[in-house]
Amino acid sequence: MNIGSWIIQKELKKLHNTDSNNNVQSANVTAAAAASCEVALGEEDNVDQDNEDITLLPPAVTDSVIIEVDTDEVEELSSDGHFDNDDGALVCRNSPSPSCANPAATDQSTVGLLTDDPALWPKKLTAEERCAIVRKGPMQSTLDAIVEKVKGAKYYAVIMDCTPDISHNEQLSVVLRIVNCELHKGVSIHKHFVGFLLAEDTTGKGLLELFLGHLETLLLDISDCRGHSYDNGSNMQGKKQGVQKRVLDLNPKALCVPCGSHTLNLVIGDAAKSSTISLNFYGVLQRLYNLFSGSVQRWAILQVNVKDFTIKALSTTRWECRVEAVKAVRYQLPDILNALDALHDFAIEKSDSECASSASSLCRELKKWPFMASCVVWYNVLYVINKVSMILQGPKVSIETMKREISAVIDFLQDFREHGFNAAKIDAREIAEKMEVEMIWADVRQKKTKRQFDYEGTEETTSTAEEHFRREFFLHLVDTALVKTRERFSYMENFFKLYGFLYSTDIMKSTVQAGNLDECCNRFEKAMEDVDAVN
């Protein structure tokens, strides 16, 4: 319905309840007459702000009605472009003859008018009111159609994620994923958004209760859920109190699959925190970005000297940020040093002591041999993992593809652990020679073991600065990445054990040739058997 129908019927209800004899012609203007109206609002300055009552004037002709209104009630409606400059009046044109109307019917029809058009909802609504409007409004027909599709498919999977909105309220978005089988269209996979839910309690228990309440509203059964996917937050993926654990307690057949790309990003985050050297390395990169992004003039100096890759800030949510930040330094370190020298001269000219000091400090850090080696090591690791992450973000990725790519990452890390350090030193040496920087490892103070008894030996193990760097930085990085990759993707083996023989014809042929088809089918039936589906 349009805006004119809503406002006119709203005021007709007022007039009908107060005095139906005050204006005979107003009683003849009905919902049927207003359904095709165009609404026009004059300028706000021309409206009497103290007039809170709306007076319905007798129409000059049968196809035009003018209603004086208070602008406060309709100021939010002026953005639709249908308002004319008629001195604060609502002008309804092309109305059919009002003689066919029944005012009494109008009162009944105005009960649910606010739910018909979201553009007409009041500004301030509580969460309960918003949910009630969504359930009763025009979205309900779409939601009913989605629910019918889900029920027709029998089984569904759930994708949920939380994010704060502009009003700082945490909202849980719910998406249902089904396999639609139609004779004339074949098999297709569909995802259906079924609502935003206000999450006042963001614990695993609170989110599960919110989700189950929404399923109850949709008349869907949690026992028909066969999969659920979230990010890797502790409230969602927690092994003891997370949503995934609580859903599995209710329905063991609802297997959980976290986002593969997000999981890889967390592996990199864990590796970046594996040692003090790694933390300092990324701290230098962030300081570099903060320095040049501090003003337009500083950024212009960077652009003059650095042509190919722009330095990037670090982020916990943008997955490619680390590899982009490291790549800019890995391949443009001499240019970045030139930019820092130019920035230092600019700061001295402007008497900016803080900027000059920061530029000098970063120059010294970037010219150190351990920093160059760290830069090469990190880029070699990030390049491979980021390439796999991009593959996993593809729309047609299956568990088989994920298993193959993650296995490739593990193989790379194992090989890199054995040969990657020497290869990184060779690449870093080329950068150092180009910049004429001495390849000297920083001296490390040897730890002395405190003797508890006099008879203990005094021998102490000593290691060179290079061995210390390899042990404290390189091995920590690679081993952390290996352990976390195996740990975070351990669920993949359970899925492939159940569904692996179905993913491709080649795998199915090899399963048949090996004589394992009956074993795979029996295992799948035992895990996913559904009496209702069989019957």
Image (cartoon, rainbow, N blue to C red):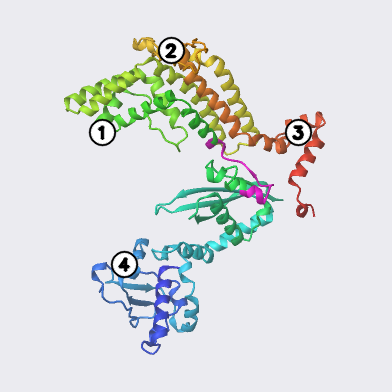
In three-dimensional space, the C-alpha distance between marks 4 and 2, rounded to whole angstroms, equals: 80 Å
Magenta highlight range:
246-262
- Residue for badge 4: 84
Answer whether labels 4 and 1 touch (C-beta < 8 Å).
no
Expressed as whole percent of the image width and height from the top left, the position of residue 389 reads: 53, 32
Answer whether labels 4 and 3 touch (C-beta < 8 Å).
no
> What residue appears at the point 50 percent right and 54 percent down from the top-left corner?
201
How many C-alpha atoms fall within 10 Å of the one at disc 4: few (<14), some, or many (≥20)? some
Expressed as whole percent of the image width and height from the top left, the position of residue 121 reads: 42, 65
> What residue appears at the point 47 percent right and 80 percent down from the top-left corner?
107
Instruction: Determine which quarter of the picture holds residue 464.
Output: top left
- Residue for badge 3: 508
In three-dimensional space, the C-alpha distance between marks 1 and 3, rounded to whole angstroms, equals: 60 Å
In three-dimensional space, the C-alpha distance between marks 4 and 1, rounded to whole angstroms, equals: 45 Å
Residue at the bottom extreme, as displayed: 21
- Residue for badge 2: 465
Query: Against 15, is 140 above or below?
Result: above
The nearer-to-camera label among 2 and 1 is 2
Mark 4: amino acid:
Asp
